[in-house]
Image (spheres, helix red, strand yellow):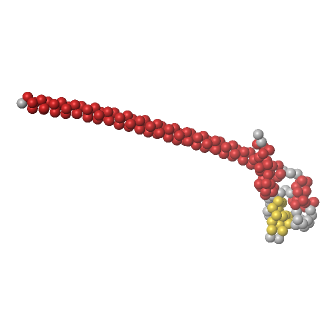
Amino acid sequence: MSGLVKILDKINSEAKSEADRLAKESLAKVETIKEQNQEKITKEIAKIEETRLKERKLLEDRIISNGELDARNIVLAKKQDILSEVYNEVLEELTKIDDNDYVDFVKRKISKEDGVVVLQEGRKEAVLKALPKVTVIEDKVVSSGFIEELDSIENNYTFEALLHIERDESQMELAKILFEK
């Protein structure tokens, strides 16, 4: 039986050696897999961090851009307010012109000396003195300038209307003059 014990011991010894070898190989494979996965995890974390930084930068740029746009809009609105104030001041000055200048304006613009007009309040006497053939519509008044009625057509020579037309044509030029850096 000692031969049998020796064979069994040898088989046990070889089995133990083989099991140890397989265990070492398995542990080595596990370590290799762990290292590979750790590399993948590290790379994935780096990608995520890079993406996060890019998105943060884009968000910061967008916020800055929106802030600059808002600031530009505020400045533009203030410039528009200033231009409106300038035009309103011009209109106010035009409504206060003296009778001689007012009559000269009517004479330059009126189509016929015997036309029909709607005048600014308080200007009738001066206009009729200079243009006695003009018919003044007394139940209507304009705040500035005058309106000439020709048949069914009205020529609007109110300072508001003329200034509105002039404003459309000259606003860019006036803005350059007022806001040139």
Pick the quarter of the image with the C terminus.
top right
Can residue 13 be seen here? The reply is yes
Can residue 89 be seen here? The reply is no
Which of the pair 133/49 is nearer the observer?
49
Determine which quarter of the picture holds residue 6.
Answer: top left
Residue visible at 88% across and 51% down? 98
Which of the pair 74/65 is nearer the observer?
65
- The residue positioned farthest toward the bottom in the image shown: 151
Residue 161 percent across, percent down from the top left: 78, 57
Determine which quarter of the picture holds residue 62.
Answer: top right
Residue visible at 84% across and 68% down? 150
Residue 151 percent across, percent down from the top left: 82, 71
Pick the quarter of the image with the N terminus.
top left
Residue visible at 90% across and 60% down? 107
Position of residue 52 in the picture relative to residue 9 (left or right): right
Q: Is residue 45 above or below residue 167?
A: above
Residue 177 percent across, percent down from the top left: 80, 44
Residue 168 percent across, percent down from the top left: 77, 54
Q: How many callouts does the rendering have?
A: 0
Determine which quarter of the picture holds residue 139.
Answer: bottom right
Which of the pair 51/11 is nearer the observer?
11
Which of the pair 106/133 is nearer the observer?
106
Residue visible at 90% across and 66% down? 112
- The residue positioned farthest toward the front in the image shown: 3
Position of residue 39 in the picture relative to residue 141 (left or right): left
